[in-house]
Amino acid sequence: MNQPLAGKTAFITGGARGIGRAIALKLAAAGCDVAIAYHNSHDEADAVCKMICDLGRKSLAIQADVADPESLKEAFEIFRKDFDRVDIVISNAAIGVLKPALELSLKHFRRCLETNALALNSLAQNAVPLMPAGGCLIGLSSLGSVRAIPQYAFIGASKAALESLARGLAQELGHTKKIRVNIVSAGVVDTDALKFFPNREELLAEYARRTPLGPTLTTAQVADAVYLLCLPEAAMITGHTLVVDGGYCISG
């Protein structure tokens, strides 16, 4: 079986469900040992770890709040008891409140920024000392970073901040550590999170109508894009936002 990432170790936030789960399983199938950080989804995290172990890889689930730098520091202390290096770090965990911007507060804005953007920096601070040259950090963004989506303003702003932060980190870590930092920005994926959107059915229908390669985008397809950026063949790709939307954005 071809395992181009054999011998490598990955750390994935939000790895118990949805896109994070798909990424964890994709990297494990490619040969990675995988640690997943989760917030509340303990049973789901354990189930993913079992699936990773069934693939013949080592796995570990760690409870953490990615918005809290101290919590991530503690998570990496647990991680280091089982692993002495990390080659791939995926900042996937995200949060947001779906309301008009004028109804939201500073607390909402801070929580979005801390979870969706600052977490990438906190992950880098903990991971880089364990990361060899050629390692990579990847954040998960969304089309709301560059497009106006109803009731998505604070989340979109935090995703735009994430993409900007990734470019800054790519420059810093490339010069000093030869570590790459990239973003995967996904189109509309019908995950559990999308169930909280009041216009979910409208979003899915519009995506299917406008997308040349549609009608749907799956978590596995997003994971495939993340995987591509982890490969040795992506060694000169950094500071880039890879849009995975089946052509939605080019369709008007």
Image (cartoon, grey):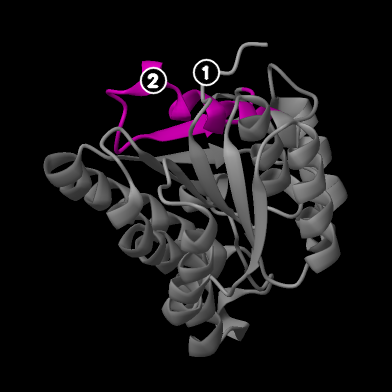
The x, y position of residue 191, in whole percent, is 79, 48
Position above or below: 70 against 151: below
**Residue 245 magenta:** yes
At x 21% / y 47%, what residue is drawn? Answer: 173
- The foreground one among 182 and 232 is 232
Q: Is residue 123 above or below residue 211?
A: below
Give the side of residue 8 with respect to residue 15, left or right: left
Is residue 54 toward the left or the right of residue 178 in the image? Answer: right
Q: Position of residue 242 (x, y in %)?
A: 46, 31
Label 1 residue SS: loop
Q: Nearer the viewer, residue 191 or 138?
A: 138
State yes or no: discs 1 and 2 in contact (Cβ < 8 Å). yes
Residue at horizontal 41%, vertical 40%?
A: 87
Q: Is residue 222 visible?
A: no
Q: Residues within 10 Å of mark 2 (few under 14, many from 20)?
A: few
Viewer-closest of 178 and 163: 178
> Gap between marks 1 and 2, in whole Å?
8 Å
Farthest residue toward the top?
A: 1
First in sequence, mark 1 or 2: give its number. 1
Q: Give left or right: position of 148 versus 192.
A: left
Amino acid at circle 2? Pro
Q: Which residues are magenta?
A: 221-246
Q: Quadrant of the N terminus?
A: top right
Give the residue number, with chain letter if any, for mark 2.
Answer: 232
Q: Residue 41 at what x, y percent from top left? A: 78, 66
Quarter of the image with the C terminus is top right
Amino acid type shown at disc 1: Pro
Which residue matches tag 1? Answer: 4
